[in-house]
Amino acid sequence: MSKGLPKMEDDYSSWYNELVKKADLAENSAVRGCMIVKPYGFSIWEKMQSAIDKMFKETGHTNAYFPLFIPKSFLSKEADHVEGFAKECAVVTHYRLKNDENGQGVVVDPEARLEEELIVRPTSETVIWSTYKNWIQSYRDLPLLINQWANVVRWEMRTRLFLRTTEFLWQEGHTAHATEQEAIEEASKMLEVYTDFAENFMAVPVIKGVKTESERFAGAVDTYCIEALMQDGKALQAGTSHFLGQNFAKAFDVKFSNKDGALDYVWGTSWGVTTRLMGALIMVHSDNNGLVLPPKLAPDQVVIVPIFKNDDQLKALSEKAGQIMEKLRDRGITVKLDDRTTHKPGWKFAEYELKGVPLRIALGPRDLENNTVELARRDTLTKEVVPMDGIDEHIQNLLEDIQNNLFEKARTYRDQHITRVETYQDFKDTLEEKGGFILAHWDGTAETEQKIKEETKATIRCIPLDGEMESGKCIISGKPSKQRVYFAKAY
RNA sequence: CGGGGCGUGGCGCAGUCCGGUUAGCGCACCUGCUUUGGGAGCAGGGGGCCGCAGGUUCGAAUCCUGCCGCCCCGACCA
């Protein structure tokens, strides 16, 4: 049992906060609402980045970089967009400081006021579409498939490490197309990419769907999303992909000549995932001993802890460990030997459990004698003594097994927490007693959605894309419904 | 912005109500010895503008006034 980590069943929220800090993932900074991503946390994020980035490249996208600052006037060009983001923008008004005449320190130089204020980007649609206007003239310039890795700022009232911070890291894809159909296909394709990444790398099962009008991205025609379920029964939006229609093309006057020589507005999409995925990764798999990482995203997949009484023993063990490491690295497995003499084995065991390393090898004099190693799995917390021969193949299989096991475990939990209800009373009882996703009929009106949100704090997470069509009656109004939608309390 | 709480070695806290030796405890840190297959033991040691400013008093971490900061709950949100 980990020292000082609260138990998740006692206080899920503190468990999460403490885990993030104790596992060395991130900490609060001197700037309110902004986090410091620590080296271990960042290396997990880098693993995520490189896997998703590869998928973007494989689907024809290229990376570029657009500015951090956006002229204030840009933001107001798309009406819904400014409406959605205005309340959470950081604004740059001056470009110079000067020494305070009265006391110590510096003050903003009132002489140095900007003629037009700059907004620190909350998202980049506006700067990017203002650029696309220059880049697109003909159907031959389309499609334009661009992604950028960046930081953005949204001035949130309350923040939590990874889940909601004032500044966060993300990728944002922005594409332009000649036809509506092609843009819709792009938005769907990227939702598939996110689904693939969430399920096959993060081992997090997700529900694909489309957002209701009230939950839609500001400026989009349709917002597609993937929704995951955390171990406390709350949902978390893990990725979004927006079909923008011609909204931004019209706002920024981006037209192209089609094959018939006629001028038309370009069709757009945008899609993104953020460092919030770190929060999902933590909350879906981890336990009271600490972080649990899926092998595909673990910075160290295997750690070797030597157990020794003196330098001679350490030397012999290091040699053996070296042989194991070489074999594992040949198979593309990342492995680390922790031969520090400053910490004892027991301390290291606990440490690597806290940090979620999928497999731990303990190697001592007893193993040298018997030609064995002790293998400990992080996901099941089980240990086995196995022969040294064929250890590399065994470990490779185990890592695959752990990856699959984590996904299956999360999926089983998720599926057990999807409840179909027929009445509002059942809805409220389920939300209160069990949590999770609730599948219920909804009449499609914003009024009903709003009423449920106000009374229960549950929101419509999505209208499922691959959900079965089934006619029924809305749990509130009793009006007819063609399909059930997913409700949940969400982060 | 509304409601609640908290500022004391690096971290977590006690002490504050009811003013009085040198401000204490756990963890961490340093030194030495013994240890090392699940967060070692013993001994010794270092580290504090008690959030800031003013006031009351012989005397303030403690009482009074003002300010600052942070956390939690709500409205907002990836």
Image (cartoon, rainbow, N blue to C red):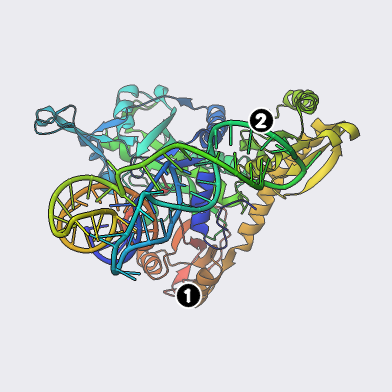
Res A233 → quadrant: bottom right
Residue in the image at 47% along x and 75% along y = A424
- The subunit letter for the residue under badge 1 reads A
- Category of crowding for the residue at label 2, using alpha-carbon neighbours closer than 10 angstroms: few (below 14), some (14–19), many (at least 20): few
Question: Residue type at mark 2?
Answer: Arg
Name the residue beneath numbered marker 2. A340
- The subunit letter for the residue under badge 2 reads A
Residue A80 visible, this angle: no
Q: Quadrant of the C terminus of chain A?
A: bottom left
Between A312 and A454, the one nearer to me in the picture = A312
- Kindly state the secondary structure of the residue where label 2 is placed: loop
Tag on residue A424? 1
- Taking A178 as reference, is B2 left or right? left
Q: How many marks?
A: 2
- Taking B69 as reference, is A345 left or right? right
Residue A274 visible, this angle: yes
Q: Residue furthest right?
A: A370
Cα–Cα span, label 2 and label 1: 59 Å
Q: Position of residue A397 (x, y in %)?
A: 78, 38
